[in-house]
Every structure is written in C-alpha cells, then in structure tokens.
Image (cartoon, rainbow, N blue to C red):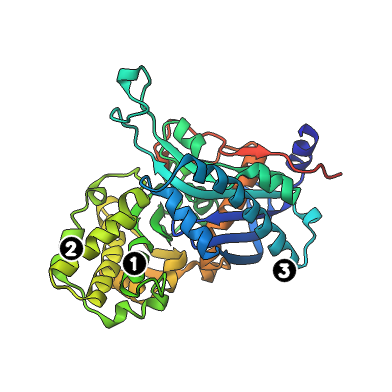
Amino acid sequence: MLTEFLRLQGKNTKKIVGLMSGTSADGIDACLAEISGNGVNTEAKILAFATYPYHEKIRNAILEASNPLTGTVEKICQLNFSLGKLFADAVKRIAKESGISLFDIDLIGSHGQTIYHMPYSSADSPVCNISNGIAPIGSTLQIGEPSVIAQDAGITTVADFRPGDIAAGGQGAPLVSYMDFILFMNQKKGRALQNIGGIANVTFLPENCTINEVIAFDTGPGNMVIDRITERITNNALHFDRDGMLAAQGKTDNALLLNLQKHPFLSKPPPKTTGREEFGVQYADKISNDAAKSGINNLDILTTVTEFTACTIAESYKQWILNKHRISEVILSGGGCHNKTLLKYIAQHLDPSISVCSIDMFGIPSDSKEALAFAILANETISGNANNIPNATGAKEQVILGKIIPGKYRK
C-alpha cells in the first residue's frame, strides 16, 4: 500500500472518478475528471459524467434501510456490499463509455449512500447517553462498501468522508464547500453556490475571502419534499416533477406555506445540516395528509411545497448572509436546477440585483458538481491535505477526511 500511496502522492495530474448517491436515492452520479495540483492550486477538467439510475428494487431497498421503522441490520449489511458492487460497476461503465482504460484511472472518491445522519449529539439516545457512562456524540452512516469498490475496480478508493469531520466535533456536512472555495473564490464578487439535491445547501464565499471566512450550511429541503409529493399525487407513476411542469399548473396555498415556514430547522443558526430524518417521507406524507384534510387539492399542495423550498433558500440568505455581506451572484447546481417552477420562485424571492446562473456556465454540468467534489476531496486526502472547513461544519479543527482502501499497485 505504501508504494502505491507514494506513487499517487508524487503524481501531479491524476484521472479520478468521483461517485455520489444523494438523499433522493435515484441513482449513482459518476464524474471522471482530470485533476492537477492540490489545495488552492487545484485545476479540474471534467472528462465524462453520467448518472446510472438504480433499479426500482434497489431504490426501494435503500429507502427501507434508511427508515428506522423498516431498516434492519441484515438489510443494511447486505445493501452495503451490494451498493459497493454497483459503485464499482459505475466506475467501469464511465471508463468504458469515455474510452479510457481502468488502468489509467488513478483514484476513486466515493461519497457512498447516506442511510442515516444524526449530526447532533443527544444525551437522550438509548444507545449512547451519559447515564451509561458514554458521552453523546453525533453520528452518520454512508454505505457502499469501499473495499468492494477498490477490489472490483482494482483502483485505490477514498471513501467515508463524513465521519472524520464528526469525530472532530463537526456535523459531517457540508463537505462540498471545500471544492467551492478552491474553485470559485473571487476577489471582487460575493458568491453563493447553491446546490439543490434532495437537501439544499449553500456555500457563501465573501469577496477575496480566506477559507476561515467561508459560510456554508444546509438551507433545508431541496427536491426531497417535492419528489415525495409528486409520487403521492401521481400514485408513484412519477418520482419527480419533470421541469416543474406539474407545480406550474397549481397555485400556492398561503396558509399552508406560512405553516411550513415555522419548521424549527429554518430558524436554527449555522453551522447546521439536515436530511431525510427531518424532511423525508414521514414529513412529506404528513404535509400531504393534513393539506388534503384542509381541502387543498393535489396540484396546489405540490406548488406550495415547491415555493416553500424556494423560500427556505432565499430566507436563509436574508437571515445568515445578507445581514453582514453582499451577494453578487448565485450559482445553482444539482437536480433542482431542472425544475423551472422552483427556479422561478427562487428568483421571485431574491433581490433582483442578485444575478442567478447555472454552474454549467463555468464548465461544470449542474448534475455533476457533488460527484466532482468527492473526486477533489479524494485528491486532497491522498495529498495529505486537511479538506474540511470548520467554519462550515462546526468542527473544532481542520482534519484529513476519508478512509483509503488500496487498489492494485501501478508501476
């Protein structure tokens, strides 16, 4: 392993595959990138990007394993290794489709699939509490066994990035902010990089900022609630509202919108992170059931939660960024970029002086950003660089994230 590790450290330009499966559990994003340098001297060029959708049975298995009511140790144990194989397959597929030999790929950076995320320690935990003599600590679990990825693909794999930050007292998120800083910091513009995946998160880079001045946090739900409401009103015929076409046909119910905006997470100051534990299926189902009892029709429920998502983004800026800084532009990424109704509401709730654009304008496809981020984080880990941002995650210090699983030695 040491020889392979030294080989990777001594190579300035590497071909790296970043792998990401988000909270929506719709598939594996694979980004093959050529990355040169490290730290603030990093340059990244995307060679190929693809999303490989999960079979319906796999998606259902992930959602079952993620639900405390249906998840079991047996399901999670088996799924961990099954997903590892699927992640390895994604690496082999993107290499083949791009005409690049697996032997020429130096490294894999895998985020894995989040099963549960509890960033806030709790003395009330039945397993870990002070009365048992064990101090409470936050926790998180991503599966997609990296040993399987490294063995099956034959490539050194860096994975499991979030636990290192939590061990250092952070919340294990957001981690993409590190890439945002090294690639997008601007000397003259204050930039908000807004990703809209299952959960939405923002990285704000004040003009000419240092890494210690970066502000980053989860703004709230991204596509998660919208997707679940779409499934319900279409009887699972659709898993997401393509282009926001369904939401465009309804109207916002203001009483429901005001009620949704009372969610306690939204008033919690950064650093903060969230997930399906707060905004998942149970939350969305309760919204749908309560709204239906109030006589709100299906399309209006969907339109309202779409505007709610936009409001959480805009209001978070007003509460935690614009009170001290000026935002020149918002750079959007993630699957939510394709929802035209959501983008319309975001623009309506932001000051018109703020420019809004897609990350595609910078040569990074909007769907590829998070996968690219884990390719870059893997490169930093191999380079021996700390790659979290304590100001964003709440960690006590900068640490090197990820676990390294050696692949086959390359001469």
Earlier-in-chain disc, 3 versus 1? 3
Spot occupied by residue 79 in the image (x, y as percentages of width and height):
55, 48
Q: Amino acid at mark 1?
A: Ile
Spot occupied by residue 205 in the image (x, y as percentages of width and height):
43, 53
Earlier-in-chain disc, 2 versus 1? 1
Label 1 crowding class (10 Å Cα cut-off): few <14, some 14-19, many 20+?
many
Q: Is residue 389 visible?
A: no
Mark 3 to mark 2 CA distance (whole Å): 47 Å
Q: Is residue 406 visible?
A: yes
Left or right of 188? Residue 262 is left
Instruction: In the rendered view, tell whether residue 242 sits above or below residue 212.
Output: below
At 67% from the left and 45% from the top, the residue drawn is 148
Spot occupied by residue 376 in the image (x, y as percentages of width and height):
60, 50
Name the image quarter holding the C terminus: top right
Earlier-in-chain disc, 3 versus 2? 3
- Which residue is more in the foreground, 238 or 34? 238
Q: Amino acid at mark 3?
A: Glu
At 40% from the left and 64% from the top, the residue drawn is 330
Q: Which residue is mark 2?
A: 290
| Labelled disc at residue 97 | 3
Q: Secondary structure at mark 1?
A: helix
The number of discs equals: 3
Left or right of 189? Residue 95 is right
Image marks 2 and 1: residues in contact by CB distance under 8 Å: no
Name the image quarter holding the N terminus: top right
Q: Secondary structure at mark 3?
A: helix
Label 3 crowding class (10 Å Cα cut-off): few <14, some 14-19, many 20+?
few
Q: Quadrant of residue 252?
A: bottom left
| Labelled disc at residue 226 | 1
Mark 3 to mark 1 CA distance (whole Å): 32 Å
